[in-house]
Image: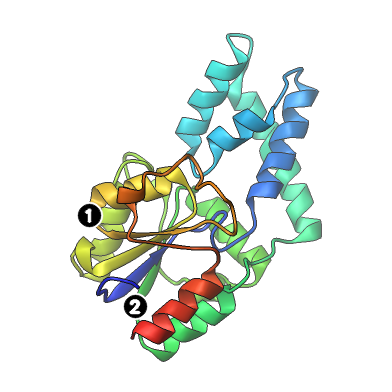
Amino acid sequence: MLPRFRAVVLDLDGLILDTEPTYRRAWRQTAAELGFDFTEAIARRLEGQSIDTIARILSDAFGPGFDFETFHRLSARRWHRWVEVHGIPVKPGYRRLMELLRRRRIPYLLATNSQRRYAVKCLTLAGIAADFPAIVSRDDVTAGKPAPEIYLRACEKLALPPALCLAVEDSFPGILAAHRAGTQPVLVTYGNAVPPGDVPENHWVARFSSLEQLAECIEACN
């Protein structure tokens, strides 16, 4: 069951789009090129994080010999080359959820920790840029998730109090940001047995294994 809500705020990376593998690939290969070991443990720590937090995590992990600006430039170039050829797939259930929100006339908004240019690039490559005329990105706030500002800004754009907005997330930073903002956080795990980052159960109001399952619940509850 879902609590009463009037709008839906959606994360991007890992929730709507299957971008995480593309980022990991670019990061891993660039780290190897620069002589660093990009482990699975490091990769997990980066899930859902903003660019400034990613810089801090990698700098701490790789030590004083690591130049994040060089790493970011090379990995971004590698990432662009890959996705231009291979594209970015949408996650299962996305299209059904969007059709349902439109049919029910439920307002929705994209709220992402990504910089706007990356968000627009990803949406365009996935063929769904027209679905999101309004976006709140990392560029619009002073602090990214897990700070609440992105969700607070999204609720302002929707002209609704946070308590009437579902915030759909797949990562610990996102759920924490949504919780801190006072929204109704919804965790989508895509079948993972353990929520990303061991998200405390009192930080989310509902948990689903896919967007398809979330759509089914909205269909049944409204």
| Left or right placement of residue 182 versus residue 17 in this view | left
Residue at image location 18% in from the left, 65% down from the top: 161
Residue identified by numbered label 2: 107
Foreground of the two, 46 or 133 = 46
Identity of the residue drawn at 63% across and 48% down: 20
Q: Residue furthest bottom?
A: 103
Locate residue 215, reporting x and y percent.
48, 78
What sort of colour scheme is used for the picture?
rainbow
Q: Where, quadrant-wise, is the C terminus in this rendering?
A: bottom left
On screen, residue 42 above or below 121:
above
**Front residue of 184 and 53:** 184
**Image quadrant where one finds the N terminus:** bottom left
Image quadrant assignment for residue 40? top right
Q: Residue at x 35, y 81 (%)?
A: 106
Q: Position of residue 196 (x, y in %)?
A: 51, 45
**Residue 41 has which mark?**
none
Q: Is residue 164 above or below residue 70?
A: below
Q: Nearer the viewer, residue 127 or 214?
A: 214
Q: Nearer the viewer, residue 176 or 1?
A: 1
Q: Nearer the viewer, mark 1 or mark 2?
A: 1
Disc 1 residue crowd, few under 14, some 14–19, many 20+, Cα 10 Å: some
Q: Amino acid at mark 2?
A: Pro
Q: Earlier in the sequence, mark 1 or mark 2?
A: 2
Left or right position of 186 against 57: left
Residue at 69%, 48% in the rendered image: 21
Residue 97 vertical position relative to residue 172 in the rendered view, above or below: below
View extreme (left): residue: 161
SS class, disc 1: loop
Which mark is on residue 182? 1
Measuring from the top left, give residue 180's x and y in whole percent: 26, 47
Tell me if mark 2 has few (under 14), some (14-19) or many (20+) residues whose alpha carbon lies within 10 angstroms of its own.
Answer: few
- In percent of width and height, residue 163 lies at 21, 63
